[in-house]
Image (tube, helix red, strand yellow):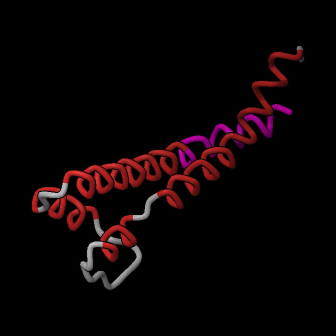
Amino acid sequence: MNAINENIVIFFTVSPLFFFIVAVSFRLLDNSALLFLQKEILVTSSNVSVDCIKSQIKATEDREFKNKLKLALLYRRMHRTCLILMLFSIPLMFTGYYML
């Protein structure tokens, strides 16, 4: 097996871990509960629902708050996307592991 194939196999074996770390990073960047508390909007959980964020985006007139909520929504979507990519890369990990 040449070096390129070995590098591809190594990439396949570590890609789920990479996507998981990136997903956790995006989840840590999502600070929607803090944004609501700073505006004195009571939230019962640190995991604010997407519907609640969207309704506040439509309802608020504060431009800065609206932009921060849109950014938090983007981080939430990127978190979900990376988790899906992680799940799709698990079969590739097993394939790469058995190719070693």
Residue 60: % across, % down = 13, 61
Looking at this view, is 34 or 98 the one in front? Answer: 34
Residue at position x 29%, y 56% from top? 69
On screen, residue 36 versus residue 34, left or right, reads: left
Q: Is residue 39 left or right of residue 1?
A: left
**Residue 72 occupies quadrant:** bottom left
For residue 33, above or below residue 27 = below
Up the image or down, 27 lies above or below 18; here it is: below
Q: Could you tell me residue 20's position as x and y percent? A: 61, 52
The C terminus, quarter of image: top right
Residue positioned 58% across, 57% down in the render = 24
Q: Is residue 67 magenta?
A: no
Residue 62 placement: quadrant: bottom left
Q: Between residues 76 and 40, which one lies in front from this camera angle? A: 40
Q: Characterize the magenta stretch by its predominant secondary structure.
A: helix
In x, y percent, where is residue 13? 75, 40
Q: In this view, does 69 lie to the left or right of 14?
A: left
Residue at (23, 54) in percent of width and height: 66
Find the magenta span and give its range.
86-100
Residue drawn at the location 81% of the way across and 16% of the way down: 4
Q: Position of residue 74 (x, y in %)?
A: 36, 47
